Structures are given as C-alpha cells and as structure tokens.
Image: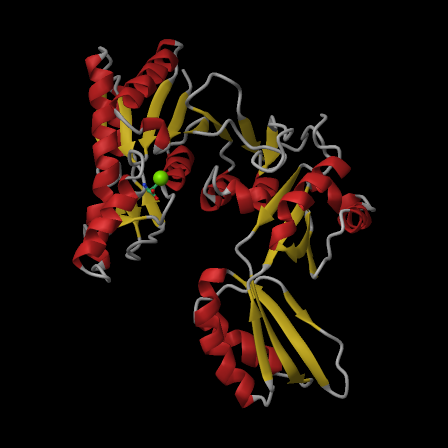
C-alpha cells in the first residue's frame, strides 16, 4: 500500500460538482489500494476575492490578519472535500495546516516551512482515514496562522510528501502536464513524459502557471518525484524527477518565454573598481532581484552597465539607481519595458556544442533581432522584442524538432 500525497488546484475543485468529481477520483485510488493524503487549494478565485475584501477595508491590511483571512479559503475546500468523501461512504478527515503539523517562520504572506510534525496525519492514516490537508498555510511557534505565498499549496504538498515521507507527490491541475512549449503559442507542442527538476525550474518561466517553482526546488532537495496531470481527464501527465536515465539526454527539452522583463541601462559609468558593487548592493538590499547583467568594454574609461529585472520592480529600482548614478557621475539612466526572454532548455546542452549557433541563426532567419544573450548550464536565453515572442517560440520549436519525439 503506497502512501501518496495528492494536491488539487483551485479550478479542479471550483464548485460543488467538481469537489464531488475529485472525491470520486480519490475513492478510485483508495479502492486500488493506495493510502492518500490530499492537499486542497482554495476553490476557484477564492483567494483573490478574500484579498479584494480586505482591500475594501484598507489598502494595507495587517499581515497577520490577512493571513488568517486567506487561510479560510483552503479550510472551506478541504472541509467540503472531506464531507464529499464521507457522503460517499469513505472515512475522511479535514485538517488545517496547523492541525496537520505544518510549522513555519513568522514571515506573514511568504512564510517558509520550518518543521513538519506529522503525528496527527499518521494517526488518522492509521485509523484508515483519507486525510485532507488545507494547503498554503501553517502555524508559527507563537500559534499565529501564516500563509506560504501565492500558489503555495504546491509547496504544502511537496513538503508533506518529503516529510511523511510519501512515495510521490501528485499535482492535479487544469493543464495536462508540462509541454515542450506554451501550447497557446505552439499548437503542436508535445506533452513531456518526464523532465528533470533542473529543467522544470528553467522552464518555469511559463511553467510557473503549471507548478510553483519553490515546490519544484523543494522536490529536488528531498528527491520527491512530482507527477503533474489534469484532474479533468484521465490522460497521463508529466513526471518531474531526478532520475539519471532521462529519455532525451542530448536534446533541447523545451522552449520557455517570459514577458516580465524590464531593462535599465546606466550610461557613462566610470570604469574603476567598486562601481558594480555601488550599483548592485543597494538593489540587493532593496530586495530587487537582478537578472542579466552586461557591462560593455569601456571607451575612454567610461562604460555602459545594463541589467534586467521584473517589471513590477522597475519603479523601485529606478528610485534606487538614479541617486547612485548621480553619485558616481554617470550622466544618464535609461529604462524600457518592451523586451521579453525566450529560452531553450535541456540538460543535454551541457555536453554538446552547436545549440547557441542554431538558436541565433533561427532567430535571424525569422527576422528577429537579439538584444541581449544570457546562459546557464542548461539554458540559453535571448532577449528580444516582446511582440516577436510568439514567432520566436514557434520558430525555435520547429528548429529543434520538438514536435517529434
Ligand atoms: N489559494 C492560494 C492562491 O491562490 C494558494 C494556492 O492556490 O496554491 O495563491
Ligand atoms: Mg490558486
């Protein structure tokens, strides 16, 4: 009898009918002999509606109270799911994150799980119950309820699978798995049978819609196999794992895109030690995560410093960078938000040559100008004009023959 953690996302349990449908899926697994711990997300757009309610009272809700409020979304869905199971004759019990033993630090709104005390879950399993755990939440040492950040139920599920421990974690959502590219851009995108944690993290730029990257990271650290599939169909999903014998070791696995890019260029920066630190230290202290950094070769001891960040951070970053530029006598700070990233991702790229050239040639043939290039061990990313993204993704998908296995 395998112990499995399953997680159902908001649309999978969006209304009473869907809750009953999910109960039926759970029952068929129990009847097949598995023991289940099920993590529930809030129904549909409940979390957004709760946030809107709070904002109707004040623009800056107290983080402690906001967390307590938001935690109710997952309480509603987990209790209804337990009721649906009991109504169908299957003993089930719903537990809040706190009751399930999920301990966190005190960072309201973005708490991290510090410890799992699974005693109660194990007791309930022992008693033959299906255990339904409210996702996205935990409790501090001081007995305050916290939430784990938007999309945090995935993290709850993987953490439970790691801590119990369970054989694997199954994430049920409204898409069928991880595809070679965003199917909105590439109709012939292919569902992957398996993908490594590292590749999944690199694909997360659009894959984040499928699974929360923090949960993938946690899965990688604890070696929890994560299976992503649709709760609306019976078709096979994608297994994210660390197995060495991946099916296509030497190929590009997928194309990712990310349109959340803002670029800042500081012109005429003096070329001397300490300048980069002077610029990037305050950004780090301001909690702004900087992505690509390019420093041009200097002409007459002056250089341009270019970097990219998330568009949400642009105003805050400019407020930090402008005074710094002034203090180092750099005459000009420019910003723009028309760029986007397209990436090719694949573990096999580490050991094989020619991928970069092929990518650049493909973009050139599609008439797309590359503005910046960055790489990791298993990814090559080009920054291009945002309007060209669909064309670029389609061209790259074709050039790397991703439609055929
Ligand atoms: N309900 C929370 C959210 O919408 C957590 C989750 O769905 O995973 O962000
Ligand atoms: Mg959600």
Residue at 65% across, 50% down: 388
Q: How many marks?
A: 0
Q: Quadrant of residue 169?
A: top left
Q: Quadrant of residue 155?
A: top left
User: x, y percentage for residue 142?
Assistant: 19, 54
Considering depth in this image, is 266 or 172 the residue closer to the camera? Answer: 266
Position of 194 with respect to 132 (left or right) is right
Considering depth in this image, is 307 or 143 the residue closer to the camera? Answer: 307
Q: Residue furthest left?
A: 57
Position of 368 with respect to 169 (left or right) is right
Q: Is residue 176 above or below residue 301?
A: above
Quadrant for the C terminus, please: top right
Q: Is residue 397 above or below residue 377?
A: above
Ligand 2 sits in which quadrant? Answer: top left
Q: How is the image coloured?
A: secondary structure
Residue at 35% across, 22% down: 36
User: x, y percentage for residue 274?
Assistant: 61, 83
Considering depth in this image, is 84 or 335 the residue closer to the camera? Answer: 335
Considering depth in this image, is 82 or 246 the residue closer to the camera? Answer: 82
Residue at 37% across, 11% down: 28
Q: Is residue 281 above or below residue 138?
A: below
Position of 167 with respect to 84 (left or right) is right
Residue 377 visible at all: yes
Residue 102 visible at all: no
User: x, y percentage for residue 55?
Assistant: 22, 56
User: x, y percentage for residue 90?
Assistant: 24, 13
Q: Quadrant of residue 123?
A: top left
Quadrant for the N terminus, please: top left
């Amino acid at each position: 009898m395998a112990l499995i953690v399953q997680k159902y996302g908001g649309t999978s349990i969006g209304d009473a009918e869907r809750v009953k449908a999910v109960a039926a899926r759970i029952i068929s697994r129990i009847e097949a002999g598995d023991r289940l711990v099920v993590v529930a997300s809030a129904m549909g757009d409940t979390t957004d509606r709760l946030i809107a309610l709070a904002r109707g009272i004040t623009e800056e809700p107290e983080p402690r109270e906001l967390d307590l409020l938001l935690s109710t979304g997952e309480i509603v869905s987990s209790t209804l799911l337990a009721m649906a199971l009991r109504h169908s004759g299957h003993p089930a019990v719903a537990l809040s994150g706190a009751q399930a033993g999920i301990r966190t630090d005190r960072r309201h709104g973005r708490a991290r799980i510090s410890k799992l005390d699974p005693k109660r879950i194990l007791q309930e399993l022992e008693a033959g119950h299906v255990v339904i755990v409210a996702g996205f939440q935990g409790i501090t040492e001081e007995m305050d309820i916290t939430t784990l950040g938007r999309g945090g139920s995935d993290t709850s599920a993987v953490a439970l699978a790691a801590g119990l421990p369970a054989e694997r974690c199954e994430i049920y959502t409204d898409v069928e798995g991880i595809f070679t590219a965003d199917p909105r851009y590439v109709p012939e995108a292919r569902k992957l049978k398996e993908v490594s944690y590292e590749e999944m993290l690199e694909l997360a730029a659009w894959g984040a819609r499928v699974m929360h990257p923090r949960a993938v990271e946690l899965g990688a650290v604890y070696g929890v196999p994560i299976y992503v599939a649709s709760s609306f169909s019976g078709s096979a999903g994608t297994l994210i794992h660390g197995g060495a014998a991946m099916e296509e070791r030497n190929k590009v696995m997928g194309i990712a895109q990310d349109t959340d890019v803002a670029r800042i260029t500081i012109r005429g920066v003096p070329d001397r030690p300490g300048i980069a630190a002077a610029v990037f230290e305050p950004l780090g202290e301001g909690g702004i995560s900087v992505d690509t950094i390019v420093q041009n070769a200097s002409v007459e001891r002056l250089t341009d410093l270019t970097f990219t960040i998330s568009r949400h951070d642009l105003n805050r970053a400019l407020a930090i960078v402008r005074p710094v530029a002034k203090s180092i006598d750099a005459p000009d700070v420019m910003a723009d938000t028309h760029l986007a990233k397209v990436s090719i991702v694949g573990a096999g790229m580490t050991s094989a040559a020619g991928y970069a050239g092929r990518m650049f040639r493909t973009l050139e043939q599609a008439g797309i100008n590359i503005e910046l290039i960055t790489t990791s061990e298993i990814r090559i990313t080009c920054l291009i004009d945002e309007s060209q993204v669909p064309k670029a993704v389609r061209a790259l998908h074709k050039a790397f023959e991703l439609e055929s296995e």
